[in-house]
Image: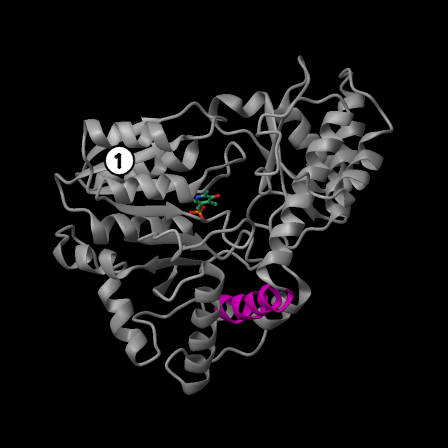
Amino acid sequence: MKKHLLTPGPTPVPPEVLAATAAPMIHHRAPDFRVLLERTVGRLQQVFCTTNDVLLFTASGTGAFESAVANLVSPGDSVLAVSHGEFGERWAKLASVYGADVTSLAVAWGETPRADDLARALAEKPADVVFLVHSETSTGVVADIEALAAVTKAAGALVVVDAVSSLGAVPLETDVWGLDVVVSGSQKALMSPPGLAFAAVSPAAWERCELATSPRFYFDWHRYRKSYESLGTPFTPAVATVAGLDVALGMILDAGLDTAFARHAALGRACREGAKAMGLKLFSPDDESSAVVTAIFTPEGANAKELVLALRDRFGITVAGGHGDMATRLFRIGHIGWFDVFDITTALAAVELILTDMGAPITRGVAVSRALEAYGEAVAVP
Ligand SMILES: *Cc1c(COP(=O)(O)O)cnc(C)c1O
């Protein structure tokens, strides 16, 4: 059976990228790897829109999260995590593991966090570091990081952003927005296999890192910066994944970041319009910000877990389920990275078939054509 990977991570990997990962192995202390590393990090800086150091770890995205906490937070430090889903909760848990005094600014799942609420929370209880999530993959909400970062800076705290599923999909301006640390990973919009995580670190974050007393070894940022001086990495990196990522970043930058952002917005629009045409209700916001993943309710009585399994077993299509309590009600179609509109119509057509078999009350025969039509529509000017 042909397989279709339509989740928000890992995501499909283009053949050129896969081919690069299959090249003969090179040694990570040899000159050819140095050239590759230097080029890849330079490309990452362009995608992060930063001149800050971008550190590269062999880890999943959560490894870069942990590096940020370990290098910035000392036991007893006051930190605030803005939590509007699974990944905001992860920041809060991680910071408490490191002994921080954690305040969670919890926003209901599916809601978008507001800058004035953050400003109020920071006025009530100041924080040294604020942790944010750009694209909350569990809900489909993309937060206004520029506004949240501005109130964080105004309150004198360092701003740390999870951009794992947003980097390369929606605009993110590390330097212009003054983001101190931005973390991401290889396996989402960057069209590469899992295995690499990144942290872009500002001069202010480096200053705080000097003072942080939490124990760290593998994720000690200083080791990475020191190795970079000789164009190396402190430990054996995932060499093959770096080779693939280099090619993927080259593809993204050659086409231009704006092209990628416009494609993601159009894919989100196609997915939303197709789902609604079928009569389904959206959980993720019904606007252009939802460019990363579309979270959709199944109709009353149709179990989303069964839908997800049937898609996989009958058609080889993998979509994501809902997290936690949402598992029976929600499914999520990803559209980050190497996706085109026919991936969206494939998902919609298959969902339509399975829901029909499940006896769910949906409108048939319209989702695919509505999605194709919406894909081509110009972005509405507000
Ligand atoms: C995928 C993802 C992560 C990282 O998950 P890993 O499994 O550790 O790579 C973190 N935050 C968001 C928003 C994500 O989508």
Which residue is nearer to you in this view: 380 or 343?
380
Span highlighted in magenta in the image: 241-255
Q: Residue furthest right?
A: 365
- Residue 249 within the magenta-colored segment of the rendering: yes
Counting from the top left corner in percent of width and height, residue 213 is at 12, 52
Counting from the top left corner in percent of width and height, residue 121 is at 26, 28
- Rendered view: 180 above or below 291: below
**For the C terminus, which image quadrant?**
top right
- Rendered view: 47 above or below 75: below
- At x 58%, y 76%, the residue is 23
- Residue 259 within the magenta-colored segment of the rendering: no
- At x 78%, y 37%, the residue is 371
Say which quarter of the image contains residue 176. bottom left
Q: Residue furthest front?
A: 382
Counting from the top left corner in percent of width and height, residue 140 is at 54, 35
- At x 44%, y 42%, the residue is 134
Q: Which residue is mark 1?
A: 80
Say which quarter of the image contains residue 20. bottom right
- At x 30%, y 81%, the residue is 230
